[in-house]
């Protein structure tokens, strides 16, 4: 029973991360019908901008709550800006072209970020930038306190990251369903052309969607980097793929679906790997994807939309 | 008589190619032979990937995964049959026959893997395939690294050197002939129709999923062939050879040459392989250059060098499927 609850704690903390990343995939897919391949790498950039900010502020020497907050907000801003830049220069020029063109560009952007960060350092800064392929150690923003409740190990990091993740998901829910921007976003996702005719600035909404998704990726990255402090330039690949699976599972384009999908995927992975196939952890998401595509390709909450000719 | 002519026509590229390759092999220095052989393997990869990414308009980015399946199958077979001598054959011929069977087995298993991956993902629109193949590529690596039978992370070393210039050349000829004849066949026409407009193709009665899956299986099988040839050239079979860096390399070749052009893939594969050989010291920048190349190509010239044109469009006598009396 202890083991069961331990897996529950671990599964929830992994699942919220997947959910946060999956939200970015699903929102961008909703407005652009594009799988934003680079999203997992925006997550990686989030971790690294947190890393550089933390070093600039000296978090390692004297961690304070204020510094942690600055690091958090700073890398959210960096990632949001990165998302907007990627959209502006890589995807917007291709919006009228065949979908394949944008997909190839997205793959290009993804690899550019992954391998750009693995280049040898330019030597301009004290900390090497680009960081190179070796993993780096993310400084701890506050002291780690672990409790054992009935044998289940739980740390303050787990509690904080669960609270922050659920807070952001709730916030996003409010933004999407309760604000003007969210209404505009849903309208663009429903039909971009008609939304444009109704006076919605489609370009701005799409840029805003990218910013929102990238900010959530940064949040996810920092929560992960806080509890598992080793970061490297290809850290975004696997979480990115799995978050995509979570988005498909929940119904791609559907915001609550991505949250549920992420949590389910995290729990499934934790339980299957914990009780049964420990060395094939990374293959589980893939198996789930194949089953979803075979059984219910529109996902849990997705609706099948008839293709108009 | 007509049947004989047809058989001869399909064997012609091989019959012409064999003596030429043989002569070239004798005249080449060892260093050049190795460079050209790895270029030839890339030609097989690029042309076979073009069947999916170019002809069918789907997008696979996990070609190296299928390569790995073919490579490990072939490597396991040649390692098991290292000391086997088929009765009644000279040693050279016996080795060659075993190698051929190993390559064919590799193609078969890679094709099966293609079926497994393609069946669920190709029922839907193309972009799912990209993610699934990328995932598959990673999963294959995870599985190999966890399986003692396949040598885990260290892989299988000490493979016999079976791949020669003639083998690679014949493989490349077979791949190009396959792609060329496929493009001119009913099957190929269906694939082109799917690429141009999937909904319209389906309305015209094309079994879109079936054709897509078959194209994907063919493409995966040839990736398996390339894998088998490659590991018997470098005499080492490790999961590191088949990471998605390799997959992306092949994608860049296909996109650069022009999605849908066999000639384009062939030329781009040769040019890129030889250019890489010349720019050894820029290895670290290779992936960055590839990704920039992809982005810039898509933004400025998404059709690549050749677009969908082929060399045989300019040489009408070579055009496949041309019959007398038919309109040009």
Image (cartoon, grey):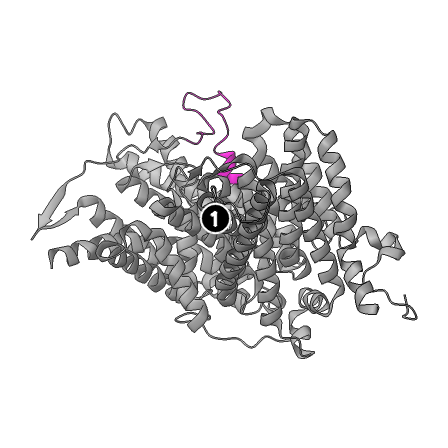
Query: Mark 1 = which residue?
Result: B77
Q: Quadrant of residue A248?
A: bottom left
Quadrant of the image containing the N terminus of chain A: bottom left
State the residue in front, A107 or B88.
B88
Tell me if residue A66 comes above or below residue A249 in the rendering: above
- Could you tell me if residue A106 is visible in this image? no
- Could you tell me if residue A306 is visible in this image? yes
- Whole-percent x and y of residue A91? 60, 51
Residue at the far front: name it.
B88
- Whole-percent x and y of residue B254? 66, 48
User: Where does the magenta region start and end?
Assistant: A112-133
Residue at coordinates 74% horizontally, 57% vertically from top-left? B180
Tell me if residue B118 comes above or below residue A42 in the rendering: below
- Whole-percent x and y of residue A224? 31, 44
Q: Is residue A142 magenta?
A: no
In the picture, measured across the screen, residue A59 lies left or right of residue B155, that is left
State the residue in front, B235 or B265.
B235
């Amino acid at each position: 029973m202890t083991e069961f609850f331990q897996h529950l704690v671990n599964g929830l903390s992994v699942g919220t991360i997947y959910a946060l990343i999956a939200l970015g995939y699903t929102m961008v897919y909703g407005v652009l019908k594009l799988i934003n391949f680079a999203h997992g790498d925006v997550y990686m950039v989030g971790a690294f901008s947190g890393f550089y900010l933390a070093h600039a502020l000296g978090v390692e020497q004297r961690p304070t709550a204020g510094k942690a907050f600055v690091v958090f907000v700073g890398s959210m801003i960096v990632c949001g800006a990165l998302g907007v830049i990627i959209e502006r220069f890589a995807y917007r020029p291709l919006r009228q072209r065949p979908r394949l063109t944008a997909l190839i560009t997205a793959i290009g952007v993804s690899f550019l970020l992954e391998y750009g960060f693995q280049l040898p350092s330019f030597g301009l800064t004290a900390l090497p930038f680009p960081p190179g392929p070796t993993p780096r150690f993310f400084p701890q923003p506050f002291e780690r306190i672990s409790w054992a409740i009935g044998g289940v190990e739980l740390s303050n990091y787990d509690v904080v990251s669960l609270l922050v993740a659920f807070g952001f998901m709730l916030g996003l829910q409010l933004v999407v369903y309760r604000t003007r921007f969210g209404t505009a976003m849903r309208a663009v996702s429903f039909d971009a052309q008609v939304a444009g005719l109704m006076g919605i600035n489609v370009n701005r909404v799409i840029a805003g969607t990218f910013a929102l998704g990238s900010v959530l990726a940064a949040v996810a990255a920092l929560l992960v980097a806080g509890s598992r402090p080793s970061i490297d330039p290809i850290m975004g690949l696997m979480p990115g793929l799995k978050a995509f699976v979570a988005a498909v599972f929940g119904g791609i384009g559907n915001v609550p679906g991505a949250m549920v999908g992420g949590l389910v995927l995290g729990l499934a992975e934790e339980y299957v790997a914990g009780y049964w196939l420990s060395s094939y952890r990374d293959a589980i998401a893939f198996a789930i994807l194949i089953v979803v595509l075979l059984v219910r390709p529109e996902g849990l909450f997705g609706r099948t939309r008839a293709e108009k000719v | 008589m007509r049947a004989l002519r047809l058989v001869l026509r399909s064997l012609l590229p091989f019959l012409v190619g064999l003596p030429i390759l043989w002569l070239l092999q004798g005249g080449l220095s060892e260093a050049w032979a190795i460079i050209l052989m790895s270029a030839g393997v890339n030609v097989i990869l690029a042309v076979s990937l073009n069947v999916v990414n170019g002809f069918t308009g789907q997008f696979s980015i996990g070609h190296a995964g299928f390569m790995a399946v073919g490579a490990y199958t072939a490597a396991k077979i040649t390692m098991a049959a290292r000391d086997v001598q088929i009765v009644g054959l000279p040693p050279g011929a016996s080795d060659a026959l075993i190698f051929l069977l190993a390559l064919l087995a590799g193609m078969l298993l890679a094709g099966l893997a293609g079926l497994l991956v393609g069946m669920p993902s190709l029922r839907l629109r193309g972009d799912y395939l990209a993610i699934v193949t990328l995932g598959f590529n990673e999963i294959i690596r995870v599985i190999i690294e966890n399986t003692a039978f396949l040598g885990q992370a260290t892989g299988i070393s000490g493979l016999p050197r079976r791949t020669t210039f003639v083998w690679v050349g014949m493989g490349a000829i077979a791949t190009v002939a396959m792609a060329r004849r496929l493009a001119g066949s009913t099957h190929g026409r269906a694939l082109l129709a799917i690429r141009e407009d999937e909904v319209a193709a389906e309305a015209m009665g094309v079994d879109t999923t079936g054709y897509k899956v078959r194209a994907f299986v063919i493409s995966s099988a040839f990736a398996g062939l390339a894998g088998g040839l490659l590991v018997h050239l470098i005499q080492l079979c490790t999961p590191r050879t088949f990471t998605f860096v390799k997959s992306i390399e092949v994608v860049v070749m296909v996109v650069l040459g022009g999605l849908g052009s066999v000639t384009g893939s062939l030329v781009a594969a040769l040019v890129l392989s030889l250019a890489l050989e010349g720019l050894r010291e820029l290895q670290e920048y290779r992936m960055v250059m590839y990704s920039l190349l992809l982005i810039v190509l898509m933004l400025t010239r998404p059709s690549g060098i050749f677009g969908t044109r082929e060399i045989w469009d300019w040489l009408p006598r070579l055009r496949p499927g041309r019959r007398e009396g038919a309109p040009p």
